[in-house]
Each structure stands twice: as structure tokens, then as C-alpha cells.
Image (cartoon, rainbow, N blue to C red):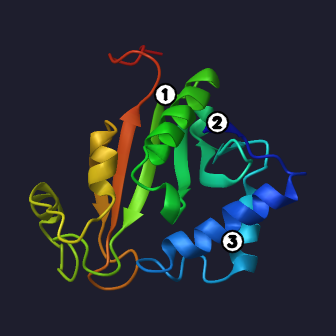
Amino acid sequence: MIIKDLLADDEDSIRQAAKMLVEGFRENWPEAWPDLDSALEEVRQSFAPDRISRAAAEESGEVVGWVGGISMYEGKVWELHPLVVSRKARGRSVGRALVEDLEARVRERGGLTLWLGTDDENGMTSLYGKDLYPNVLEHLAGIRNVRNHPFEFYLKMGFVIVGVMPDANGPGKPDIYMAKRVGGVAGPAPVP
């Protein structure tokens, strides 16, 4: 497996990545990319100058994973969006390799933090179906993985939960925010 830039003129790889989005999100997040056209639009948006678009490919050229990054805060922070691995390649560390590669690309561009949002729209965590107000952080502190939610994958990758947006996807359907330092040194900010 190799990880490479997904290129705007590689129509075959673009279509493979888009198909993975539709198939990979169909079961738990079907509204994310309900059809090939919406997924193709997402992939094509990843070629903007403030984006990173990387694909994991087999020696045959078949794309088995894709990750995108979006620059924010003048390049100091990047959003990981999206990450998808084909069903046949799951369990082979493709997702891990793509996230590590994205971290390196963000660091090369001077980024300090990589963040992501990971929704719970269908009862995959203990936060689902709850009114998280007014004690949002109390609920977040007790989060449990009920049904293979991806937040545990990101925890294993060194991300930490930094917050939650209650009702982001409707009542009782939160978005869990996670982040990881990928560059720079911890410490106080310089005084202006």
C-alpha cells in the first residue's frame, strides 16, 4: 500500500474515493453522502488550495482509503474531513496510516492542531438520545462506546475529546469534537 496525493485529474481514483464515501457512511451516517454525485462533489472540493487530499492505494492502483484536511485559523488548525476506508481494507491499519500521513502533511504546512467532529446520530455512544443540557461536560466525562463508534479509534490515535455540540444533528444527536497537537511546542502564548 502507498499513500499519495489524490489528484484532480485522476478521475478513476476520484470515483473510487467517492464510492467509498457512499458505501462507508451508508450504514451509520446515510445523509452524509447519500449518492455518488454528493460524494463526487466532496472529493472535488478537496482539491482547493487550503486543503489536503490523500489516498491509500494498493499496488494495483485501487484506492482503499481516503483522507482530507481543511485549513482553518490561518493554517494553525486543520480539520480532518473526511476519513474513509473500503470494507475490504478495514483491519489492515489503512485508517491509521492515512491519519498519520495527514498529521505529517499538516505539520509540514506549519499546522499545530488537527481536529475532527464525529457525530452520533444513531445510538453509538452513551450521549445519544440524552438532553445534555445543562451539565454537558458531566455527560461528556462519562461517555461510553455503545456500538463501535469511531471516537475510540481516534483516542487510540492520540486524539482527545475537547467538547461536544449537543443536538448538532437534531434532539439527542450530538457531534463529538476531538483534537490532537501535531506541531509546535506546548507552553504559554507570547505576550503581545
Disc number placed over residue 112 in the picture, else none: 1
The mark that comes first in sequence, 2 or 1, is 2
Q: Position of residue 13 (x, y in %)?
A: 77, 56
Residue 80 in view of the camera? yes
Tell me if residue 27 comes above or below residue 48 in the rendering. Answer: below
Crowd tier of the residue under label 1, counting other residues whose Cα lies within 10 Å: few below 14, some 14–19, many 20 or above: many
Residue at far right of view: 9
The mark that comes first in sequence, 1 or 3, is 3
Q: Amino acid at mark 2?
A: Ile
Depth check: give the residue in front, 52 or 138: 52
The mark that comes first in sequence, 2 or 3, is 2
**Residue beneath the point at 43% across and 47% down:** 92
Q: Position of residue 179 (x, y in %)?
A: 37, 42
Q: Position of residue 79 (x, y in %)?
A: 53, 47
User: In which quadrant will I find the N terminus?
Assistant: top right
Crowd tier of the residue under label 2, counting other residues whose Cα lies within 10 Å: few below 14, some 14–19, many 20 or above: few
Tell me if residue 71 comes above or below residue 101 in the rendering. Answer: below
Disc number placed over residue 39 in the picture, else none: 3
Disc number placed over residue 2 in the picture, else none: 2
For discs 2 and 1, the disc positioned in front in the rendered view: 2
Q: Marks 1 and 3, how far apart in space? A: 29 Å
**Residue beneath the point at 18% across and 73% down:** 132
Residue 94 placement, left or right of 49: left
